[in-house]
Amino acid sequence: MSKKEKNTDTEEITFRRLAFQALPEIWTYQIIAGLLLMIPISFIGNLIEMVTATPEGVFTTANIKDFLLSWRMPVLLVLAAVLAMVYLVSEILGRILLNDDILRGEQQKTARILSDSASSLKRLMNPTGLLLILYILLLAPLCGIGYTVSMSSSFQIPHFIMDVVMASPLLVVLYFAVIVFLIWLGYRFIFVLHAFLLDGMAPADAVRHSAGIVRDK
């Protein structure tokens, strides 16, 4: 068999896997995961609306102190944390495991992928893991690079804070310096979750591993 024929066969096999295995598996995951997570997401969303339904539950510059000191703040933080974990499992951890299965030619059920993703959250409950979650949920959306979830993809700094920042040249310089630093973090640690999930590394080891990969390129 000639080299040209070998290349053609490889392309045909690759296309066949894409059309008949990869795409159907991706679509199946998106549909089933969306249906399975619709109930907890809707339930938590309704609880958040109930907590903020009264005038006292609206967060504004006028009542910021009273809001932070009220019972609503810790309740909202707990609900938001649970909701964030649901999105993290479905949209990031689960998809990394799904893509790994596709590359390996395996076909794990969506429920199994979500279960493995949820189980991995326990290993993120340490200082390094919590910093990774903080970056994914809050910091990455600000700079537009790195892992993000749809829950916080439109996150932005409130206008009343940005007005104060833009009014001071020093704060403007510091603001853009922070953005550049966050972009650098997203680039340097882009492989952290892959090492954490696929290689079973601890979060701190995964951070060092990702930095080493990027540094060696």
Image (spheres, helix red, strand yellow):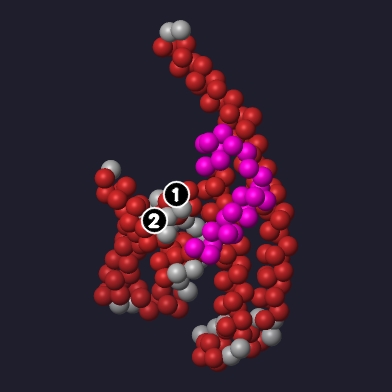
Farthest residue to the top: give it.
1
Q: Is residue 13 above or below residue 166?
A: above
Closer to the chain start, of discs 1 and 2, is 1
For label 2, the SS is helix
Which is in the foreground here, disc 1 or disc 2?
1
Pointer 1 local density, CA inside 10 Å: few below 14, some 14–19, many at least 20: few
Residue at image coords 61%, 81%: 75
Q: Position of residue 191 (x, y in %)?
A: 40, 50
For label 1, the SS is loop
Q: Position of residue 115 (x, y in %)?
A: 63, 55
Residue at mark 1 to residue at mark 2: CA–CA distance? 9 Å
Please report contact status of discs 1 and 2: CB closer than 8 Å, yes or no.
yes
Q: Position of residue 93 (x, y in %)?
A: 54, 54
Q: Amino acid at mark 2?
A: Ala
Left or right: 121, with 25 as reference point = left
Residue at image coords 63%, 43%: 108
Q: Which mark is residue 73?
A: none
Pointer 2 local density, CA inside 10 Å: few below 14, some 14–19, many at least 20: many
Left or right: 135, with 180 as reference point = right
Q: Which span is picked out in magenta?
A: 100-123
**Residue bearing mark 1:** 199
Q: Is residue 155 above or below residue 211?
A: below
Residue at image coords 62%, 33%: 21
Instruction: Inspect the magenta stretch and tell me whether residue 174 lies in it.
Output: no
Instruction: Inspect the magenta stretch and tell me whether residue 122 lies in it.
Output: yes
Foreground of the two, 91 or 207? 207
What is the tally of numbered marks visible in this picture? 2
**Residue bearing mark 2:** 206
Q: Which secondary structure type mostly characterizes the magenta part of the structure?
A: helix
